[in-house]
Image (cartoon, rainbow, N blue to C red):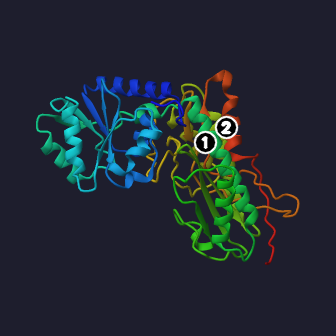
């Protein structure tokens, strides 16, 4: 392998990841593992590309570098951008499942137990059935989760990427909020948000940025649609800052004009819920404990809530980003990056347009690092990085264009 490659992680870190996966394979009595999720392929090789829209797979064995099965078109890119370089390309006239089966046979594991990512959205039923038919001597079993269990605990380099992604999300939200005025279109706000994040180093996004105003603000996954923002509108903004395929989601809501009593109550409820959740993050606490603190705080203040996403790991990689739901009994611990909260939407407003054009970080989705007692302040530092600034509630003046 050449030494000039700009790998996202050191070769040693990749090798440690591979060793951990092989240990789990051994525990499950697997001779080989076929991976299809692009997140897991990236985690073990460093390969990041939009090529996941066609068939690709990574063959992991106990005694050879991970072997990529992918289109001939990506061969050069794969060799130049991964530490392992091993690839078995197929042409567009080849049957990729036959190529995969041949690779398994050549690796001398065709008669063993082979784990298949059955939960992957990148392997369809027809392909799975054909693999079974082409490998009659093998025992194909479910290999889902072999990699994800190790991905949950982030390395220092991963956390650095997530912190930077959160910073980019914060910059984008601040710019978008500053662009919101009566008469501006959702498209114009989206353009500002994209420009601000990309010019500061954001890579291609894990998802399209979400912007919905007025009646569209409460719809799930609303993207910009040309609507002109009006006085009294609620505007929902969500960004996905992305660095080396690590994504930090940041969501906030803005009111253009005076906030209603219900909106003000919502803001107060979410602020208190965030504080209660943070206070509950401590060694040996489970996701259930933190969620109970959050829900208890909400229930004392407001009756209508959205489901909590507590326990969902930080978004990662491409549009499916395979969020990892943690069991409620799993303890939080050092280097575990989670969404603390996704509850009643924070309604944020602002005043003093001339002097206080600053994003105050009123968000209903925060990233936190659960750490041990002597480093507990790192939670707040990470939250501040993701949220940008302390929570405040202001009113946004209306400026007629």
> How busy is the neighbourhood of tag 2: few (under 14 within 10 Å), some, or many (20 plus)?
many
Contact, mark 2 vs mark 1 (Cβ under 8 Å): yes
**Count of numbered tags:** 2
Secondary structure state at the residue bearing disc 1: strand
Placement of 59 over or under 169, stated as above or below: above
Report the residue marked by disc 1: 367
Secondary structure state at the residue bearing disc 2: helix
- Seen in the image, is 104 located left or right of residue 85? left
Let me know if residue 65 appears in the view: yes
Where is residue 146? Give x, y as percent.
35, 33
Where is residue 207? Give x, y as percent.
52, 56
Q: Nearer the viewer, residue 18 or 226?
A: 18
Where is residue 394? Give x, y as percent.
79, 59
Q: Quadrant of residue 182?
A: bottom right
- Whole-number angstrom distance, CA of label 2 to CA of label 1: 7 Å
Where is residue 64? Give x, y as percent.
31, 26
Placement of 293 over or under 153, stated as above or below: below
- Label placed on residue 46: none
- Label placed on residue 382: 2
- Seen in the image, is 376 located left or right of residue 129? right
């Amino acid at each position: 392998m050449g030494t000039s490659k700009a790998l996202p992680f050191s070769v040693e870190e990749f090798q440690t990841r591979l060793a951990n996966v092989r240990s789990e394979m051994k525990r499950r009595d697997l001779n080989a593992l076929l991976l299809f999720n692009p997140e897991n392929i990236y985690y073990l090789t460093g390969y990041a590309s939009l090529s996941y829209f066609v068939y690709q797979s990574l063959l992991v064995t106990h005694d050879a570098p991970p072997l990529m099965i992918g289109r001939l078109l990506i061969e050069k890119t794969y060799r130049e951008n991964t530490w392992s370089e091993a690839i078995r390309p197929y042409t567009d006239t080849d049957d990729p499942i036959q190529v995969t089966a041949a690779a398994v046979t050549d690796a001398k594991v065709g008669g063993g137990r082979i784990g298949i990512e059955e939960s992957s959205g990148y392997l369809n039923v027809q392909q799975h059935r054909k693999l079974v038919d082409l490998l009659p001597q093998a025992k194909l079993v479910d290999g889902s989760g072999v990699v994800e269990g190790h991905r949950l605990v982030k390395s220092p380099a991963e956390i650095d990427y997530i912190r930077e992604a959160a910073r980019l999300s914060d910059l984008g939200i601040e710019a978008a909020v500053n662009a919101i005025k009566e008469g501006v279109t959702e498209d114009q706000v989206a353009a500002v948000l994209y420009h601000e994040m990309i010019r500061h180093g954001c890579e291609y996004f894990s998802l399209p940025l979400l912007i919905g105003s007025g009646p569209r603000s409460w719809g799930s996954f609303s993207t910009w649609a040309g609507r002109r923002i009006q006085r009294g509108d609620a505007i929902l903004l969500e960004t996905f800052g992305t660095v080396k395929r690590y994504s930090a989601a940041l969501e906030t809501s803005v009111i253009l004009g005076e906030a209603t009593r219900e909106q003000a109550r919502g803001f107060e409820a979410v602020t208190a819920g965030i504080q209660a959740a943070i206070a509950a993050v401590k060694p040996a606490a489970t996701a259930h404990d933190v969620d109970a603190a959050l829900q208890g705080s909400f229930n004392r203040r407001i009756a209508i809530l959205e489901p909590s996403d507590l326990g969902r790991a930080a978004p990662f990689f491409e549009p499916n980003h395979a969020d990892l739901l943690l069991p409620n009994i799993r303890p939080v611990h050092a280097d575990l990056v989670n969404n603390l909260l996704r509850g009643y939407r924070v309604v944020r407003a602002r005043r003093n347009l001339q002097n206080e054009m600053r994003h105050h970080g009123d968000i209903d989705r925060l990233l936190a690092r659960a750490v041990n007692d002597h480093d507990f302040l790192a939670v707040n530092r990470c939250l501040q990085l993701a949220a940008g600034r302390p929570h405040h509630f202001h009113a946004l003046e209306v400026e007629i264009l």
